[in-house]
Image (cartoon, rainbow, N blue to C red):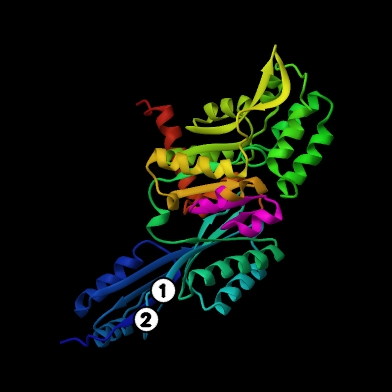
């Protein structure tokens, strides 16, 4: 009878076809059972680890095994813990991603008693991002403290660090709710409209204070909309033409649609601009303010209740209910203080190039100018996106003639 004790076999060296099959073929005659396998390739270098039973037989077999250019060793595995750890994903994004930043982030994790179980690359462009699978026995409050500490330390090194839960909450269909101004698009629509009235600077100053949370959003909106009084409604067409999507916005929307996700826009801006934008992008749900028009001119007032901070969270909940999705399967993305309630209500709240008050309270903060940087936070790699784009292009071209 072979020894039932376990042993960890590790193979490292230049990757090439046939290594995995050669190792398992050699282990076939030992009577061992495979308990765990992990294989990764980084920069053309293979690391293959196999945890098996039958320690004595496996050690004897490995001692006589020769795989050209590869190192093979046996070691005693770490004993399993009786406690089930809390599992997290920590995503690091940098342009560039520097060793000092990674060193500091992993030091913070170690000091918090969190262990890095696995690391994989999520993207190499437009930013480099890696995902760390982390296990910890800390409480939910400990995880909150860890998230804030990581965000602070990463920011000091020009890095974004986002912490999100692992498990089923990350899989399957989700509702993704986005702010519009300075999130989905690069501008503030109210400022584009105000420019036609010659009052852009005045309105921009009020917008900045509102986004920082220094003044009530509803009051600030009414103050800014009043600047549009008398403006011909035809300027809306010019504003629509002037709107520029944030880099990566189309990639984000296209990819989430492929996954069957539902998208929604919730904006303190105006339906006159947001509605056509949503239709162009195929976004199902929209909530935004509507400008009052009389005799073809803006009155300087909004119609109905203002879509403010509280209303955005209400919209997220209503859209989730309409889609039959629990809140833990929702994602909210925004940049200003009026996004805080929906970010807090969502299962994953993401601050995108946001004001400090938003970065401090969100689950994840991104400070890169690419909206598709959200994808790694959802477990979607750049290779997944590129492969899907390529497959679609092949289908669009049709089968080759021949």
Kind of element beneath mark 2: loop
Residue 344 image position (x, y, % from top left): 55, 53
Q: Residue farthest to the top?
A: 295
User: 27 or 290: which is nearer to us?
Assistant: 290
What number is the disc on residue 134? Answer: none
Residue drawn at point x = 47 percent, y = 44 percent: 317
Label tally: 2
Camera sees residue 250: no
Query: What x and y, as percent, mark residue 103?
Result: 62, 72
Q: Classify 10 Å Cα crowding around label 2: few (below 14), some (14-19), many (20 and above).
A: few
Q: Quadrant of residue 50?
A: bottom left
Assess whether mark 2 and mark 1 are in contact (beta carbons under 8 angstroms).
yes
Q: Alpha-carbon neighbours of circle 1 within 10 Å: few (<14), some, or many (≥20)?
A: some
Residue 361 % position (x, y)? 62, 58
Badge number at residue 81: 2
User: Image height check: is 365 above or below 50?
Assistant: above
Residue at the spot 74% in from the left edge and 16% down from the top edge: 232
Please say whether residue 364 is one of the residues in the magenta stretch.
yes
Cα distance in 3D space between marks 1 and 2: 9 Å
Query: From where the camera sits, is residue 199 visible?
Result: yes
Q: Is residue 262 magenta?
A: no
Residue range highlighted in magenta: 342-366
Q: Nearer the viewer, residue 335 or 386?
A: 335
Closest to the observer: 342 or 393?
A: 342
Mark 1 — residue?
85
Badge 1 element: loop
Query: Where residue 211 sits: x, y (%)?
Result: 71, 46
Quarter of the image that includes the C terminus: top left
Dividing the picture into quadrants, the one containing residue 67 is bottom left
Residue 322 to residue 18: above or below: above
């Amino acid at each position: 009878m072979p020894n039932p004790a376990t042993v960890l076999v590790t193979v490292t060296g230049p990757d090439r076809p046939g290594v995995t099959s050669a190792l398992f073929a050699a282990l076939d005659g030992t009577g061992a059972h495979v308990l765990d396998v992990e294989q990764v390739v980084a920069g053309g270098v293979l690391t293959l680890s196999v945890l098996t039973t039958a320690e004595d037989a496996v050690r004897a077999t490995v001692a006589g095994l020769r795989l050209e250019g590869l190192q093979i060793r046996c070691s005693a595995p770490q004993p399993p813990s009786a406690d089930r750890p809390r599992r997290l994903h920590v995503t690091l994004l940098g342009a560039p991603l520097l060793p000092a930043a990674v060193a500091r982030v992993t030091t913070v994790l170690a000091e918090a008693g969190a262990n890095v179980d696995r690391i994989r690359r999520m993207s190499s462009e437009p930013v480099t991002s890696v995902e760390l699978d982390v296990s910890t026995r800390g409480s939910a409050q400990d995880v909150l403290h860890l998230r804030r500490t990581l965000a602070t330390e990463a920011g000091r090194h020009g890095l974004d660090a986002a912490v999100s839960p692992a498990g089923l909450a990350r899989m399957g269909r989700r509702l993704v709710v986005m702010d519009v101004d300075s999130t989905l698009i690069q501008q503030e629509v109210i400022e584009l409209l105000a420019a036609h009235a010659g009052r852009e600077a005045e309105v921009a100053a009020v917008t900045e204070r509102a986004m920082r949370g220094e003044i009530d959003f509803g009051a600030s909106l009414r103050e800014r909309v009043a600047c549009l009084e008398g403006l011909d409604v035809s300027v809306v067409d010019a504003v629509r033409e002037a709107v520029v999507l944030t880099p990566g916005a189309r990639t984000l929307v296209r990819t989430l649609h492929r996954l069957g996700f539902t998208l929604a826009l919730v904006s303190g801006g105006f339906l006159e601009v947001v509605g056509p934008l949503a239709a162009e992008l195929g976004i199902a749900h929209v909530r935004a303010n509507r400008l009052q028009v009389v005799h073809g001119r803006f009155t300087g007032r909004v119609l109905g209740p203002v879509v403010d901070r509280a209303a955005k969270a209400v919209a997220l909940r209503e859209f989730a209910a309409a889609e039959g999705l629990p809140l833990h399967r929702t994602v909210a993305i925004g940049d200003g203080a009026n996004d805080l309630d929906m970010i807090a209500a969502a299962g994953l709240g993401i601050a995108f190039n946001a004001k400090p008050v938003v970065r401090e309270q969100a689950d994840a903060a991104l400070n890169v100018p690419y909206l598709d940087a959200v994808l790694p936070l959802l477990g979607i790699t750049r290779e997944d996106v590129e492969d899907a784009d390529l497959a679609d292009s092949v289908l669009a071209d049709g089968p080759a003639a021949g």
